[in-house]
Image: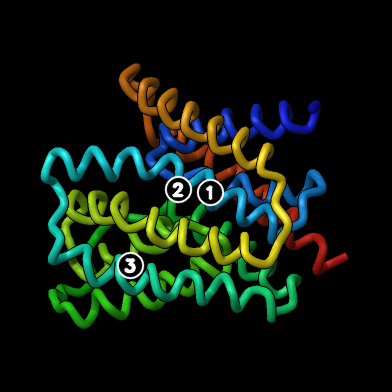
Amino acid sequence: MHDYILFSLITLVLSSLFSMGGAGAGVAIIPILSFLGIDFTVAKAIGLFAGASTTITSSVMNIKRKAVEYSFVFPIALMMLLFAPLGAYSSSYINEDIVKLFFALMLFYSATLMLFGKKKAILKVESKFILFLVGVFVGFLSGLLGLGGGNILIPLLTFFGYEPKKVAVAVSFVVPFSALGSFFTYASYVSLDWVLLGCVALSAIVGGYIGNYMMYFKLKQEHIKKVMALILYGLALKLLWHFVF
């Protein structure tokens, strides 16, 4: 019971903070659960379910507002739905230390992007073929690492010249496909504590609402992102410590 309360509080705090910064908290929840004794693969499954629980709400709202451009999101969503489970399944055949190393690199990448990344287009490419390729790459990588894929997808689509608002709507729509596809794949070959899963998912949903509410208090997002980046850098260094010592 004490563990459930601790994990729920951690998820609530991280989901609130990361929601204020406009990002998903799964990238931080997964390593912390692992450090607290949860098997890394199980932690990935829990983080995916928590992430999907929070993003489904925004997806439904965007559909109701008719903000989703289906011709744009369909190629990405389809490929992520197909390749995220493949990445999750491949994870069972790859040495866990290697997956953790890639995860640590992803933490460094995400943190650096929060601090220094500028959302500017480098190329101007508008091709359905590119969208299919993006979906394949992001889907497989996010499934392998146990992430929804938004932190990979946003800079990649921006790099190809798609406008930020269009990208944000697309990401909120496609991430549940990737997250749930990966989650059910992990759930097929690892043993899950469904009570813990429910507690973390509920805390993530509540934290998402708290974070969205707090954004109206004119908190400077750059300050929030600095805190988020420091957390991610710290988690990355903690993961890498295992490889050095």
Relative placement, left or right, of 4 versus 54 is: right
Q: Is residue 36 above or below residue 212?
A: below
Tell me how far mark 1 sits from mark 3, CA to CA.
24 Å
- Can you say which quadrant of the picture contains the C terminus? bottom right
Residue closer to the observer: 30 or 234: 30
> In front here: 159 or 207?
207
Disc 2 crowd, CA 10 A, few/some/many (<14, 14-19, 20+): many
Q: Which residue is mark 3?
A: 156
| Element type where label 2 sits in the image | helix
Q: Earlier in the sequence, mark 3 or mark 2?
A: 2
The residue most toward the top is: 217
Question: How far across and how far down the image is residue 218, in percent?
Answer: 32, 20
> What's the mark number on residue 52?
2
Residue 2: image location, x then y, percent: 80, 26
Q: Is residue 177 above or below residue 126?
A: above
Mark 3: few/some/many CA within 10 Å (<14, 14-19, 20+): some
Q: Which mark is residue 143?
A: none
Pointer 1: what residue? 49
Indicate the quadrant where residue 163 lies.
Answer: bottom left
- At horizontal 55% and vertical 38% (from top left) the residue drawn is 201
